[in-house]
Amino acid sequence: MRTVLMVAEKPSLAYCSTRKGSFVGQNVRFKMTSVCGHVMSLDFICKYFVFKEANPKLNMVKFLQVEAKGCDYVVLWLDCDKEGENICFEVLDAIQPVMNKSYGNECTIYRAKFSSITDTDICNAMTRLGEPNKNEALSVDARQELDLRIGCAFTRFQTKYFQGKYGSLDSSLISFGPCQTPTLGFCVERHDKIQSFKPEAYWVVQAKVSSGKDRPLTLDWDRVRVFDRDVGQMFVNMAKTAKEAKVDSVTKKEKAKQRPIALNTVEMLRVASSALGMSPQHTMQIAEHLYTQGFISYPRTETTHYPENFDLKGTLKQQANSCLWGEMVKALLSEGINRPRKGVDAGDHPPITPMRAASENELGTTVRLRIFTFTCLILKLLNGTCAMLTSEVIRPELLPCTTVGASYENTFLCKENKNNNFIPHFRLSTMMRACGVYSRSFVTLQLNHCHTDYFVGHLGTFLDLERGSYLAVYGRVREPSDFIKIILNCVPKMNEGLTGFEQHKGDNVTLRIGLLFFFNHPQAKPSRLHCSHCDETYSLPQNGAIKLYKELKCPLDEFELVLWTSGSRGKSYPVCPYCFSNPPFRDMKKGMGCNECTHPSCQHSLNSLGISQCVECETGVLVFDPTSGQKWRMACNKCNVVVHFFEQAHKVQVSQDSCDSCEASLVIVDFNKTRSPLPEGETQHTGCVFCDPAFQDLVELKHATMRHPMLRAGGARRGKGRGRRPMGNPKKPKDKMAALAAYFV
C-alpha cells in the first residue's frame, strides 16, 4: 500500500497521525504531520549568506525526513499565501531526497488550497489539488534577502554612527527596516508636533434653559469661543439681561450611512485597536486561534469583496442556532438576503467570515468572544436596513418658545486647547497602507517591533517615544538633563547686574570645566562620555571599565581624568577624555591615554611614569601604574606586557635618575618594617628594576613571552627611561640585558 504524507503549517492543524483511504484512484495510507512556520531562514556567515534552520532546536529538517521516508506522495496543506508557498518548497527541499522515486511522469507533489478549517472547505480542497507556485515562493526569497541585506547594512551603519556621535544613546542596536523605519517616522513626526505645541487659553459662554420641571438644555454659543477674556465677559453681561429664550427655527435632517464592506485584516486590526484597546499582535493571535479552531476563515486577507459563487446562505445557516443572533439569522433567511456592498478583490482569500456558530464556553475568553462577534458583522452586510440605538437628546415639547425666568443660567468658562494624542495602532496601520509600506503578513510584526524597541504603549495607543526613536529618524537628541534644566530656569532670576552672563550662558561651560558630574556614561557599547547640555560626546578606551580618578585634572585643559582598567591583574591607566579625542601634541594620535602623553611635567604622563623600553615589543615603554597599590605593576603602553613587582610594598615612586647600565629609570620603594624583603631590615631602597640584585626576586613578568634581545631583527635599543632614544646608530644590547632576558624566560 502506497503512503501519502500530509504536511500542515501548525501542529494544531495536524491532529490525525495515520488513516487509510483512497487517493488518485488507489487505496493508500495517509500520514499527517506539520511544521512550525518556516523551516529555513536566511542569515550571514562572514560576507556570504547561507540558509540555516529557522529554529535549530526543533531539528525540523531531520524530523521531516524521518516522516517522509518511504512516502510516495505529498500533499502540502500550508497557509494559502506567499509565505505558505515559500514554506512548501522548504518542505520539499527537505523531504524529496528520502521519498520513493516516482514512476515515469507521475505527479507526486500536490498543493491544497483552502480558506477555512471546515469539513466543506477541506473536502473541496482535496478534490481540487494543484501544484505549489514557484514564482510566489521565489518572491518571498527575494524579499527576505533584500530585507536582510538592507537591514544588516543600514542597521550596522546607523548603530555605529549614532553611538559614536550621540553619547546619550544608551542602546546597543538601532535597527533599520524598509517598513519599520517609515512607520517610526510617522510616530516621531506626531511626537514632534506634540512637543512643539503651545497651549493657549480661551473663554466659552454657556447657557442653560429649562421649562418647568423639564430637564435643562445646554445651548452652544454660535461664536464658539474667544481668546480675549474682556470680550468674553462683555458677552456674558449682555446675556444676563435676557429674560427669555426663543426658538427661531427647527431643522430636521436625515442621515444615511452605507452598510460596511466585508471585513479584511486592516479593518479588523483597526476596530480591535480603537474599540477593544488590543494591539495588532494580540488581535492576530486571537484571530489565528479562532481560525485554527474552525470558527472563522483565514484572517490574513486584503479582499473586501465576496466572490459571486460564495455560499452566503450556507454561511448564515451555520449561525441559525446561535443564542446571540439566531433569531436575526432566521429572519434574514426567510425574508431573503441582499448581496453585500462591492469591495476590492485582491485575489488572495475571501473576506474574514464566521464559518460556524460558537458559544461562550467554546470560545473561552471574553476577548475571543468579542473578536468572533465582530466577524459576524456579515449579518449586517446582508440586511437591507441597519438598526441603530441612539440616546435621546431633547423631547419635542421643549422645542416651542418657552419662557425661562428663574431657571435661566449662564456660565463663563476658561478652557485650554490641547494637543493631539499619539498615533493609535489602528491609525498607524492605515497610514502604513496609504504610504505603500503595508503588508498583511508583516504589519503586526512591524508594529510590535516598533512598540517593543521604541515606544511605551497602553491600550492600543503609543504613549511615549524612547530616545532612540529620534536618532533613528532625525539623528539628534533633544533631552537636556534635569540638572541643566534647573540651572537654565534659574538664570532669569539672577541679579541683572551680572552683565555678560546672558550672552555666555549657552557656552560649553562643562566642556571647559570638564566636571564628570555633568556627564552621562552610557552602559551600552561603545564606551563614551556625553554632555547633554553641550551636546558633546567624547570617546573612551574600549573593552575595559571606566572609573573616576580621584577628581584629578589634566594640566592642559583642566578636564577631569578617568581611569581605564582591564581588571585587577591587567593594565590600567588614566585618560583625559578631551586629549583622547583631541591630541595636544604632534607626536600623539587620537586614542592615546596619559601613559602615552609626552607632556614634560604632568605627573600622569609618560615622561613622569615611564621606566624602560618594553622587553617584548620594539615601540612600547613600560609605564608605572600608580593606582596598583599593594600589587604594584608597570605595563607596556603598546602591547599586553605587564610586569608585577614589589608586592606588599608600602609606596613606590619613579625617580628622576636613571640606571647607568640599562638607562632605565630608577624606582624608590618603601616597605613595611615587618614585611621588608630588603637585606638587614631596610625599609627603603632606590635602584633599577632590572639590574639591582636587591630587586631580582621581586619582579615577575606576565601576559607575554620573552624573546632574547639578540634574536630581534636589527638588535634592540633601550630608551632613556621616559621614552625612546632619538633616532641614530643603534647600540647593541649589553650583556646585562641578555642576562635579564634569560632570567625572564
Image (cartoon, rainbow, N blue to C red):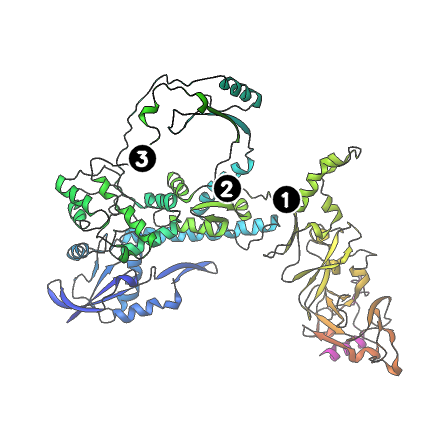
* Residue segment shown in magenta: 718-745
Q: Secondary structure at mark 2?
A: helix
Mark 2 is surrounded, within 10 Å at the Cα level, by few (under 14), some (14 to 19) or many (20 or more) other residues, namely many
**Looking at the rendering, which quadrant does residue 406 occupy?**
top left
Circle 1 residue: 480
Q: What's the amino acid at mark 3?
A: Thr
Q: Secondary structure at mark 1?
A: loop
State the SS at label 3. Answer: loop
The answer to which image quadrant residue 387 occupies is top left
Nearer the N terminus, badge 3 or badge 1?
Answer: 3
The quarter of the image holding the N terminus is bottom left
- The crowding category of the residue bearing disc 1, from other C-alpha atoms within 10 Å (few below 14, some 14 to 19, many at least 20), is some
Q: Residue 377: image x %, image y %?
A: 26, 43
The answer to whether the residues at label 3 and label 1 have Cβ atoms under 8 Å apart is no
Res 390 label: 3
Q: Nearer the viewer, mark 3 or mark 2?
A: 3
Magenta segment: does it hold 605?
A: no
Tell me what residue is drawn at x 46 percent, y 50 percent.
451
Q: Relative to residue 645, is residue 306 drawn left or right?
A: left
Q: Name the mark on residue 188.
A: 2
